[in-house]
Image: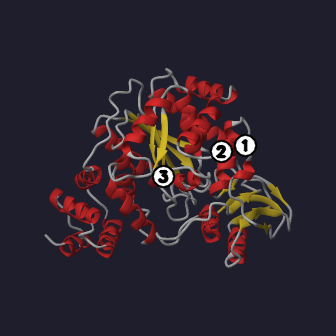
């Protein structure tokens, strides 16, 4: 069996057998199949898609590992949440401690920045000392002791995805619903969870630009989970504007803490409460979504969720003092405003451009080997529905290197649409699929 023949077969619209898919994935993981051949196969999948049988085998092959996670010793329900990626999407940092404070076990395996979207691991690593590279035993122990841990892929948990994830980011093969489904579900189903809440983004700042495409991806993932006996719900949510105001790693940590303190932007708070409510429902802590929302609000109001976040930071080697002293987080040395070219109302945003501007400042990666600057990014001042005057700041860029600041500011300014009439409010939760 040769990789080149399988690349050609998929390129020409053929259906790969289970053995052929397993050959590609094991060869990529071991290094026997070089990155340039796997990149070609990934692009062929983007163009040709996959059958249900191919996707099922791909998920199984990506889950294969010399050692599986066993959480059977924990009596509480194990529930995770995953987002397909958006701009300013820091919900994992907020809802994981909420759910854990409420008694749900949250074994969260997350990813890094991908394309124009941020990564949960990069945000966490902006907290000085925070270690996302726990061993499997450390991961198990932490879940048993405090109910939550947030880590990246390991050699034991979906090791194939760690490599393919970086390749997809660097080869413009991120957007395939089949590859997104395989990446997410191979990680999540390797966690020994009982249930999963999915936040599937739709809009200009998402990989799925339309609600129809997002719903298709959501259905793929829900069905994949159901086939292996897991309870899965997917919320299709809007990403035509950044979530919250902060875009960039340490900036988003600050905004997450603000939500856990009962403050922060309303749209981010509302989505976090909705996602947390579903986690508490699937975790059998409540009987209804409404009761889950009330319980989540209670754990924010009484400080339990914030205390849990402090505990997570401390247990993973981070400086928990950042929760009360934001100056301990990395900060960019410079500021630059992106200014409105006209007066009126913000009627829309090309949210992907906002994400790309943040990447150009150093908050994300253009190549898989790029380093991330944890302190840079931007704060969005104006969002759809807001009134704005000509020359007023639309957003403030936080930067260290000056190389692409002008280009980034121009990109932010061009991402806004401004008109004379206020638009209708954007819908946050568009559709619910499952459980």
Q: Secondary structure at mark 1?
A: loop
Q: Which mark is residue 330?
A: none
Q: Is residue 331 left or right of residue 65?
A: right
Mark in the foreground, 3 or 1: 1
> Dot 1: within a 10 Å radius of its alpha carbon, few (fewer than 14), some, or many (20 or more) residues?
some
Determine whether the residue tagged by mark 3 lies in a helix, strand or loop: loop
The residue under the point 38% across, 23% down is: 75
Q: Which mark is residue 256?
A: 2
Task: Please state, as top left, top right, bottom left or bottom right, where the N terminus lies in the image.
Answer: bottom left
Quadrant in which the C terminus appears: top left
Please report whichever mark, 2 or 1, sits nearer to the chain's N-terminal start: 2
Which numbered tag is attached to residue 84?
3
Work out whether residue 28 can be spotted. yes
Farthest-out residue, bottom:
403
Are the residues flagged by discs 2 and 1 in contact, CB closer than 8 Å?
yes
Q: Position of residue 159 (x, y in %)?
A: 33, 55
Residue shown at 62%/56% (left/top)?
249
Name the residue beneath numbered marker 1.
264
Q: What is the x, y in percent for residue 192?
A: 34, 37
């Amino acid at each position: 069996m040769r990789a080149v023949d399988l690349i050609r077969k998929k390129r020409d619209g053929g259906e790969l057998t289970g053995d052929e898919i397993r050959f590609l994935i094991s060869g990529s993981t071991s290094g026997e199949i070089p990155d340039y051949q796997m990149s070609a196969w990934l692009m062929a999948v983007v163009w040709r898609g996959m059958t249900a049988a191919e996707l099922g085998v791909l998920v199984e092959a990506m889950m294969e590992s010399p050692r599986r996670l066993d959480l059977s010793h924990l009596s509480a329900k194990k529930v995770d949440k995953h987002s397909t990626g958006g701009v300013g999407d820091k919900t994992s940092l907020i809802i994981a401690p909420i759910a854990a404070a409420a008694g749900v076990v949250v074994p969260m395996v997350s990813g890094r920045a991908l394309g124009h979207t941020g990564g949960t691991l990069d945000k966490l690593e902006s907290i000085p000392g925070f270690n996302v590279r726990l061993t499997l035993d450390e991961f198990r122990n932490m879940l048993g002791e405090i109910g939550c841990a947030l880590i990246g892929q390991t050699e034991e948990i979906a090791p194939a995805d760690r490599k393919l994830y970086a390749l997809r980011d660097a080869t413009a093969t991120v957007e395939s619903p089949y590859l997104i489904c395989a990446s997410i579900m191979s990680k999540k189903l390797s966690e020994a969870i009982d249930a999963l809440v999915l936040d599937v983004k739709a809009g200009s700042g998402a990989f799925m630009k339309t609600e129809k495409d997002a719903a298709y991806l959501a259905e793929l993932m829900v069905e994949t989970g159901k086939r292996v006996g897991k309870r899965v719900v997917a919320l299709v949510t809007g990403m035509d504007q950044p979530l919250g105001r902060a875009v960039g790693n340490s900036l988003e940590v600050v905004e997450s803490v603000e939500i856990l303190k009962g403050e922060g932007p309303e749209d981010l708070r509302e989505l976090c409460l909705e996602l947390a409510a579903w986690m508490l429902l699937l975790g059998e802590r409540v009987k209804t979504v409404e009761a889950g929302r009330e319980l989540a609000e209670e754990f924010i109001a009484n400080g339990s969720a914030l205390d849990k976040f402090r505990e997570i930071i401390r247990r993973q080697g981070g400086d928990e003092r950042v929760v009360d002293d934001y100056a301990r987080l990395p900060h960019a040395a410079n500021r630059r405003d992106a200014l409105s070219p006209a007066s009126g109302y913000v009627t829309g945003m090309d949210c992907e451009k906002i994400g790309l501007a943040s990447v150009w400042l150093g908050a994300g990666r253009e190549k898989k080997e790029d380093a991330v600057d944890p302190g840079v990014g931007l704060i969005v001042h104006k969002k759809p529905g807001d009134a704005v005057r000509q020359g007023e700041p639309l957003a403030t860029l936080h930067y260290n290197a000056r190389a692409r600041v002008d280009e980034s500011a121009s990109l932010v300014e061009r991402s806004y649409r401004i008109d004379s009439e206020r638009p209708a409010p954007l819908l946050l939760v568009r559709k619910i699929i499952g459980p």
